[in-house]
Amino acid sequence: RGLQSRRRITSITMVLTLHIAREGSHHYLARVFDGKDMVGDSTEHERIDNAIAYYGTEGEKRFPSVTEFSIWYGGWSIGNVSLDRMRADAAQLANRLVVLSAVLR
């Protein structure tokens, strides 16, 4: 008999896309996508960092398997971000998105 290797899956990573769009002064619309399909209901926020912090906190409740979000704003992404980092660094992440969208227009 040959040796059989067994791979144990310790965690599964599910990444959804969080798309934040400016709708007006102090009005941002956040939507979540799985590929091209919107999942769940959109949410409204006064600031970009509020949207990021909200999904960092509520992401697991709204989407039980999610572990990270690919975060987009103004046509630019900062990549995949863990829920923990979204909660802890929402202001910094929002600033990066604003700078990217302004500089790379």
Image (spheres, rainbow, N blue to C red):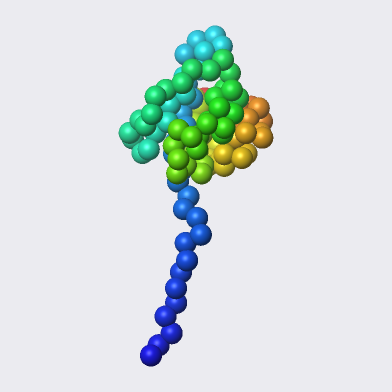
Depth check: 78 or 101 in front?
Answer: 78
Picture coordinates of residue 17, whole percent (x, y): 44, 36
Q: Is residue 94 left or right of residue 38?
A: right
Q: Residue furthest top?
A: 25
Picture coordinates of residue 65, whole percent (x, y): 45, 44
Residue 93 sits above or below residue 46 on the image: below
Specify the quadrant that holds the N terminus. bottom left
Identify which residue is drawn at 66% across, 30% down.
92
Q: Is residue 8 visible?
A: yes
Q: Is residue 75 visible?
A: no
Residue 4 sits above or below residue 90 on the image: below
Identify which residue is drawn at 61% across, 40% down.
84
Residue 44 sits above or below residue 63 on the image: above
Depth check: 97 or 28 in front?
Answer: 28
Q: Residue furthest left?
A: 37
Picture coordinates of residue 49, whole percent (x, y): 60, 25
Q: Is residue 98 left or right of residue 24?
A: right
Identify which residue is drawn at 51% across, 42% down.
68
Picture coordinates of residue 30, whole percent (x, y): 47, 24
Q: Residue furthest bottom?
A: 1
Identify which residue is drawn at 46% across, 69% down.
7
